[in-house]
Image (tube, helix red, strand yellow):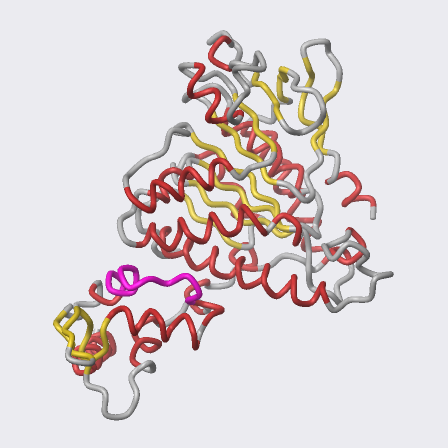
Amino acid sequence: MQAHRHLAACPFGLDERGNKVEISLLWTSFLIGAQPRQGKTFAARLLGLYGALDPYVKLTVFDGGGKPDWRKFALVADRYAFGLAMTRDGDPAEIVLEGLREIKADVQDRYERLSKLPVDVCPEGKLTREIARDPKYKMPVRIVLLDEFQEYFDLGDISKEIAALLVYLVKVAPAAGVIFVDATQRPSGIGTGQVAQQFISFRDNHQVRFSLRTGSWQVSDLVLGSGAYSEGFDSSTLLPSYKGVGILRGASDVTPTVRTYLADADDAEKILIAARALREAAGTLTGMAAGEDVAKVSRDVLADVRSMFERGENGLQWEDLAERLAGRLPEHYADITAESISAQIRAFGVRSVDVKRSGKALKGAKADDIDAAIDRRKAA
């Protein structure tokens, strides 16, 4: 149990009096915010590196900014995506979406299985270190690292499902042993409408907050949580030269100013090389780090949509398609919306046309158009 005991008390830095500051990682989520170049990514990466040294912790790393800081996590991460441009691993936005779908399905499965375990094994109905470490349960601790997560809320239609998944997961995943570490330089949010509201909900549902230097007390309050400024905590007062220094709120009964420990690029690479060796020895290297092609486990959305058509149906409205996908394939499409499935299918050249149902015409897809798209793909 040694590694999990360490994971539960991660050394984070020194407070203003030189005392060591540790953070309890399990059962919680972390929001890290700051202006650019104040140490935000390094602080988030520090937590990720610590988790990487436990070979029984499953890592997911998504960096919307595509910076070099996270690239070496490809050595150990079950799933990763860097930036937003297409790579040889696929479309990063699609990798993020599929990854979040998989995590949601895992969380739901964990809760169901945990509820069926004896009280002496699972006394509080949530994941314990013993369960997480026992391979027979297949419920390892997971850490999901999202840097520049605001980028995933500004990708058009696909952001609607990503946003819904993130809000769900930050609320319910921690008790199932899935830890979220999320960093942004734009805590004020982006966009309009439902996605903008979901951004706020996602931001505000983190239990532990760390704010390095911000531009104003209002932004500081967004990172640290409402009421921090009235309590005397304002990260905009930190000096520009205070790299890696921030205010830590929610980790304990006190709210210290902390200078985080520094792991630079060379340190990170050495740690991750060692972390990979630990995983190889323990047999816990999985997913993309193990060379698995995530495209093989991604859903064939065209085939899935075509399978929703029943005999004699020539067309289906987008709303009906979304409802059927969510009902029949909830492990993959539980949060799908009419707008999202429309965008995904139209990307294959399928027309959005009027489809009549009960005398009412709404936009949808024709079965012949979907068949034609499938044929084009085969011929390509």
The residue lying furthest to the bottom in this view is 311
Residue at 51%, 61% (x, y): give it: 102
Residue at 41%, 44% (x, y): give it: 82
Q: Nearer the viewer, residue 38 or 340?
A: 340
Secondary structure that dominates the magenta span? helix
Q: Nearer the viewer, residue 225 or 145?
A: 225
Quarter of the image where the C terminus is located: bottom left
Specify whether 86 is left or right of 131. Answer: left
Q: Position of residue 373 (x, y in %)?
A: 20, 75
Residue 50 occupies quadrant: top right
Specify whether 134 is left or right of 219. Answer: right
Q: Position of residue 203 (x, y in %)?
A: 47, 36
Q: Is residue 334 magenta?
A: yes
Residue 202 sits above or below residue 122 on the image: above
Q: Position of residue 318 (x, y in %)?
A: 25, 69
Residue 200 sits above or below residue 364 on the image: above
Specify whether 314 is left or right of 128. Answer: left
Residue 186 occupies quadrant: top left
Residue 298 occupies quadrant: bottom left
Q: Nearer the viewer, residue 142 or 343?
A: 343
Residue at 69%, 31% (x, y): give it: 23
The residue lying furthest to the right in this view is 120
Residue 73 sits above or below residue 268 on the image: below
Q: Is residue 141 magenta?
A: no
Q: Which residues are magenta?
A: 333-344
Q: Position of residue 357 (x, y in %)?
A: 20, 79
